Amino acid sequence: MEQTVITGTPNALDTTGLCLLSLDGGGVRGLSSLYILKHLMTQLSRERPELGQVKPCEIFDLIGGTSTGGLIAIMLGRLEMSVDECIDRYIKLISTVFEKKSRWPVSLSGNIRSRFDATKLESAIKDVVTSHGAEETDLFNDGCERGCRV
């Protein structure tokens, strides 16, 4: 069975089996995953020039991740970003959400402080989603046929 992507062309790598991308998350690990993926995509473009510049959503059948790797999976798969776009947005996101806080993990009253502000994370994710033409309330399975699943 031949698999297709959004462009309606066969999967560039293989027509049998599935091509999966799993991304680790957590600040630098998420960013390093993106730089490794950028290198792989560059190599793919060199080895198969007939493909031109392709996005991960045009190569991988399924993209998933843990922690911020899951957010990267959404950006690459559902929002169909290029790796460079994703790197730019991810750097902005982590600098906003994970800005340096107090050195002390415990407040004067004895409460444990979180590493990041959840409201900033939610706001940053909504900004990423809406800036790429989606609504923050859109479902992942919106009925549109996509070659890449997240």
Image (spheres, helix red, strand yellow):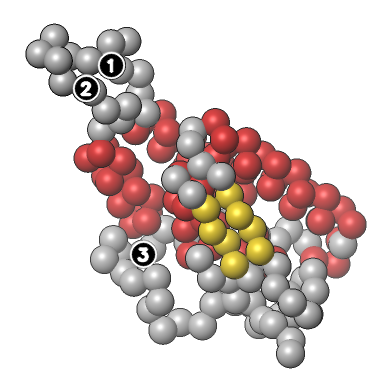
Q: Is residue 54 above or below residue 100?
A: below
Residue that numbered label 2 is attached to: 112
The residue at which mark 1 appears reads as 105
Q: Are marks 3 and 2 in contact (CB under 8 Å)?
A: no
Residue 53 position by quadrant: bottom right
Of 92 and 16, nearer the camera is 16
Instruction: Please report the residue visible at 47 percent of the width from the left and 58 percent of the height from the top.
Output: 74
Residue 108 in view here: yes
CA separation in Å, label 3 and label 2: 36 Å
Secondary structure of residue under mark 2 = loop
| Kind of element beneath mark 1 | loop
How far separated are the C-alphas under marks 2 and 1?
A: 6 Å
Q: Earlier in the sequence, mark 3 or mark 2?
A: 2
Q: Seen in the image, is 85 located left or right of residue 16?
A: left
Mark nearest the camera among 3 and 2 is 2
Q: Is residue 53 above or below residue 31?
A: below
Whichever of callouts 1 and 3 sits on the residue coming sooner in the sequence is 1
CB atoms of marks 2 and 1 within 8 Å: yes
First-in-chain label (2 vs 1): 1
Instruction: Give amino acid for label 1.
Output: Pro
What residue would you read off at disc 3?
Answer: 134
User: Residue 87: horizontal and vertical position, in percent?
Assistant: 56, 41
Which numbered disc, 1 or 3, marks the residue closer to the eye? 1
Residue 59 vs 9, above or below: the answer is above
Residue drawn at x 62%, y 43% is 34
Within 10 Å of the Cα at label 3, are there few (<14), some (14-19), or many (20+) other Cα atoms? Answer: some
Q: Residue at coordinates 67% horizontally, 81% vertically from top-left?
A: 4
Where residue 59 sits, quadrant-wise, is: bottom right
Q: Is residue 41 shown left or right of residue 69?
A: right
